[in-house]
């Protein structure tokens, strides 16, 4: 995801560690994303939050959903639910429901 895709007031999910590692690689326990995703941030993976602001250094700030102060970049984020499928039907995450 790129910074131009991030909208204040919308919700995003922090990408999973393995997903970011596969795309960017790691060194010394940190994912080599432009702002570094360090080990102490690993608990954020999979959490969803609402963006409250984006500062002049292109850090994304949370208004709710994530505790702690971290520099979060757009590369660390994804939409909280998969985007619409190519067939025009909206994909919905039902992993938490019993069917």
Image: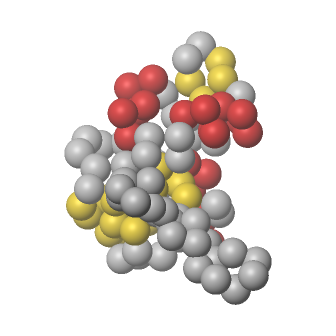
- From the viewer's side, name the closer residue of 82 and 37: 82
- Which x, y percent locates residue 47? 37, 49
Residue toward you, 90 or 6: 90
- Residue visible at 58% across and 66% down in the picture: 82
Q: Which residue is more in the foreground, 60 or 22? A: 22
Image quarter of residue 30 = top right
Q: Looking at the picture, does residue 26 appear above or below residue 69?
A: above
| Residue 15, position as x, y percentages in the image | 53, 47
Q: Does residue 91 lie above or below 73 as drawn? A: below
Q: Position of residue 35 (x, y in %)?
A: 56, 40
Residue 55 position, x and y percent, is 43, 62
**Is any part of residue 5 visible from this angle?**
no
Q: Which quarter of the figure is the N terminus placed in?
A: bottom right
Question: Where 2 falls versus 28 (above or below)?
Answer: below
Picture layout, residue 86 above or below residue 36: below
Image quadrant in which the C terminus is located? bottom left
């Amino acid at each position: 995801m790129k910074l131009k895709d991030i909208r204040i007031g919308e919700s995003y999910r922090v990408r999973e560690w393995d997903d970011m590692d596969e795309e960017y690689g790691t060194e010394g326990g940190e994912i080599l994303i432009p702002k570094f995703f360090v080990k102490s941030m690993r608990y954020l993976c999979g959490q969803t939050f609402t963006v409250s602001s984006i500062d002049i250094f292109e850090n994304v700030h949370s208004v709710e959903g994530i505790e702690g102060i971290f520099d979060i970049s757009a590369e660390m984020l994804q939409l909280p639910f998969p985007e619409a499928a190519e067939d025009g039907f909206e994909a919905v995450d039902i992993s938490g429901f019993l069917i």
